Image (cartoon, helix red, strand yellow):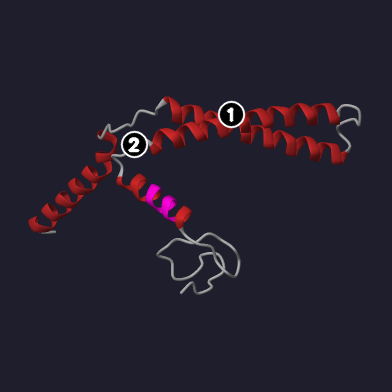
Amino acid sequence: MDIGSLFFILALTIIVIAFVVRPLQIHESQAVGQEELTRSMLLAERDRILDSLSELEFDHGLGKVPEQIFPLQRDRLMNQGADVLRQIDQFGEEVISSSADSADDPIEKLIQERRQAKKSGSFCSNCGEPTHVDDRFCVACGTSLL
């Protein structure tokens, strides 16, 4: 091997090492806000309850859960699930109202304009879906609106 090949291999090795180590040196972590943490916990609880309900019904179908215990456990899980879904709905409304107040965000502005236009728009003559003023075709059925 000549000296040029050795330098090339050495340079390639340094570049690969730098490429691999770079993500480990960057410490750009984002702090999770309380809203996001609460929403994540509620969604995890919802998933846990759904899994528990699924397992309970499966076990009941196999005969592992007695008939007198099954309705009690199912009702308890259903009530817990309903409470969690109510909390998720309330949390979602709070997030939507707080994000709608931010006039700085251009995407939110466009969404609000689109919603207002839909409210003032017409309806499809074929399927009855609301249409935007600028729409040429119905988004639900494809009927021409012109």
Q: Residue 89 location in percent, x, y?
A: 57, 34
Return the residue at label 2: 102
- Say which residue appears at 39% left-offset and 49% top-offset: 111
Mark 1 Cα-neighbour bin, 10 Å: few <14, some 14–19, many ≥20: some
Q: Residue 37 location in percent, x, y?
A: 47, 28
The mark that comes first in sequence, 2 or 1, is: 1
Q: Amino acid at mark 1?
A: Gln
Residue 86: quadrant of the picture? top right
Q: Which residues are magenta?
A: 112-117
Return the residue at label 1: 87
Q: What secondary structure is found at the residue carrying circle 1?
A: helix
In-front residue for pair 138/27: 138
- Say which residue appears at 57% left-offset and 32% top-offset: 88
Q: Main secondary structure of the magenta part?
A: helix
Q: Amino acid at mark 2?
A: Ser
Q: Is residue 146 above or below residue 58?
A: below
Q: Is residue 69 magenta-colored?
A: no
Kindly give the residue lying farthest to the left in the view shown.
3
Closer to viewer: mark 2 or mark 1: 2
In-front residue for pair 60/36: 36
